[in-house]
Amino acid sequence: MRALIGTHDLLFVTLDTLRYDVAARCLDQGRTPQLAKVLPGGVWQRRHTPASFTYAAHHAFFAGFLPTPVTPGPHERLFAARFGGSESSGPDTFVFDAADLPAGLAAAGYHTVCLGGVGFFNPAAPLGRVLPGMFAESHWYPSFGVTAVDGLGAQIGVLGTLLESVDLGRPLFTFLNVAALHQPNKHYLPGATADTVETHAAALEYVDGQLDRLFALVAGRGRPVQVIICSDHGTLYGEDGHVGHRVAHETVWTVPYAEFVLDPA
């Protein structure tokens, strides 16, 4: 990663609440063709998230602690805030002298943009300003939120408008938190009356159908784009009596992860 800083734009997408098992099954069944085209080897990596809910997971992500491979480590990280005793920084790690990744990238010349989705990015309350406050520019609208049927489409529309005013000579770090997978998601499956694993899968199909627009947009600035796409945590639909997340359950801790480079359009 260190060698790419300054020459590549960066796109970091969190598919909020996406379960690894659902992501892998939809891929195997051909239900996510856009992801199938870009995932290295045509598969999701199976990883463990650093936290069991959105706010905590993103704090860790923005300090450089992305989901960890499930195989024994240590594993060299892509990004790391400099601190004494770090055992997972290596020669390819982008180490920054700041408390968070957006600030570290800003110091390296990047313009940083956040398009939030779930409530932790809603600036109506002080808590919802913490994560977006790390970025030079942040956007949230109700049309991005968990009850919006076309939330990712709305985010892509706003991103397209704002990119018109971003200097092409300056590298860009774009972060999107996609809310579609989060409950409620029954509106993605016609006839569904409750949120289930199947409505969760239908939400992922919706997201997949928007990704070609997103990738074409970010690759249209004339730079290669390093993409990181993952979930921040899974969620439960009755397994072992649990509904939701913020519990220590394997389905919550295990998340899909991928990284790849898009060539400039």
Image (cartoon, rainbow, N blue to C red):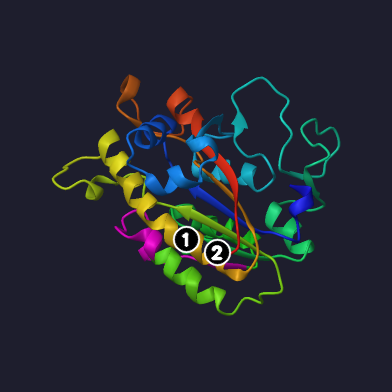
| SS under mark 1 | helix
Please tell me in which quadrant of the rendered image residue 17 appears.
top left
Q: Secondary structure at mark 2?
A: helix
x, y (%) of residue 56?
A: 57, 41
Query: For residue 47, which numbered disc appears in the image?
Result: none
Displayed quadrant of residue 198: top left
Q: Is residue 4 above or below residue 32?
A: below
What is the quadrant of the C terminus in the image? bottom right
Q: Position of residue 241 (x, y in %)?
A: 31, 22
Judge from the rendering whether residue 7 lies leftward or rightward of residue 203; answer left or right. Answer: right
Foreground of the two, 150 or 26: 26
- Front-lying residue, 236 or 1: 1
Q: Amino acid at mark 1?
A: Leu
Residue underneath mark 2: 218
Residue at image location 60% in from the left, 70% down from the top: 221
**Is 117 drawn above or below residue 110 in the view shown?**
above
Disc 2 to disc 1, how far (Cα)? 6 Å
Q: Is residue 249 visible?
A: no
Left or right: where 109 falls relative to 143: right
Q: Are the residues at dot 2 and dot 1 in contact (C-beta closer than 8 Å)? A: yes
Pointer 2 local density, CA inside 10 Å: few below 14, some 14–19, many at least 20: many
Magenta segment range? 137-153
Could you tell me the amino acid type at mark 2? Val
Near mark 1 (Cα within 10 A), the count class, few <14, some 14-19 or many ≥20, is some
Residue picked out by circle 1: 214
Residue 189, image x, y percentages: 21, 46
Q: Is residue 141 magenta?
A: yes
Q: Is residue 242 visible?
A: yes
The answer to whether 203 is drawn above or below residue 47 in the figure is below
Q: Residue at x 71, y 65 (%)?
A: 110
